[in-house]
Image: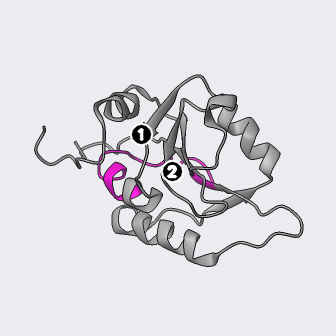
Amino acid sequence: MLKGISPLLSPKLLATLSAMGHGDEIVLADAHFPGETFNKTVIRADGLKIADLIDAILPLFELDSYTDSPLIMMAAVKGDSLDPSVEKAYRAAVDRHAKATPPIARIDRFDFYDRAKKAFAVVMTGETAKYGNLILKKGVIPTGAI
């Protein structure tokens, strides 16, 4: 164990976050997401909620400040509806660590799948919220912040 690092972060997830470069994306996927279908690098975080993982990741991970949308979620398919409490919980976790981050963007389901294919990794969680998937885009740590 390491001091100051959330026990929710497995060694594999920590290594993956560290290996990512500026502009790389990681998908925090809900339990329904077909992670293995879309990406060869899948990290298991079964039983964990995405908002809890955001709280564990963001103290160590700078979000990309050079993009309009470093946080991306899947938009509802026509005829479906979103549960606003899901985005609200994610945003509350983000705001605890990076309050100036732009609003969470929503993209079409198939565009989300395309992003997942190109992502650095997919983290399969125990999140059961419908449309609970979230992409984080990694940024550069500001000078003097280390």
Give me the C-alpha separation between circle 1 and circle 2: 8 Å
Segment colored magenta: 54-72
Identify the main secondary structure in magenta: loop
Q: Is residue 79 visible to us here?
A: yes
Q: How many marks?
A: 2
Local crowd size for mark 1, using a 10 Å CA cut-off: few (<14), some (14–19), many (≥20)? some
Residue 141 location (% of width, % of height): 35, 42
Q: Which of marks 1 and 2 is nearer the N terminus?
A: 2
Residue 65, given in percent of the width and then of the height, sits at 51, 50
Quadrant for the N terminus, please.
top left
Residue for point 80% across, 53% down:
108
Between 83 and 72, the residue placed more toward the observer is 83
- Residue at 35% over, 59% down: 55
The amino acid beneath tag 2 is Ser
Query: x, y percentage for residue 105?
Result: 67, 60
Residue 17: in magenta span:
no
Q: Do the residues labelled 1 and 2 touch (CB within 8 Å)?
A: yes
Residue 87 placement (x, y as % from top left)? 57, 69
Establish if 98 lies above or below 118.
Answer: below
Taking the image as shown, residue 121 lies to the left or right of residue 35, namely left
Q: Which of 91 and 32 is in front in this view?
A: 32
Q: Which residue is at a point 78% across and 64% down the rendered structure image?
A: 76
Q: Nearer the viewer, residue 99 or 14?
A: 14
The residue at which mark 1 appears reads as 140
Residue position for label 2? 65
**Badge 2 density bin: few <14, some 14–19, many ≥20, Cα 10 Å:** some
SS assignment at label 2: loop
- The type of colouring in the image is one colour
Vertical side of 18 occupied by 80: above or below: below
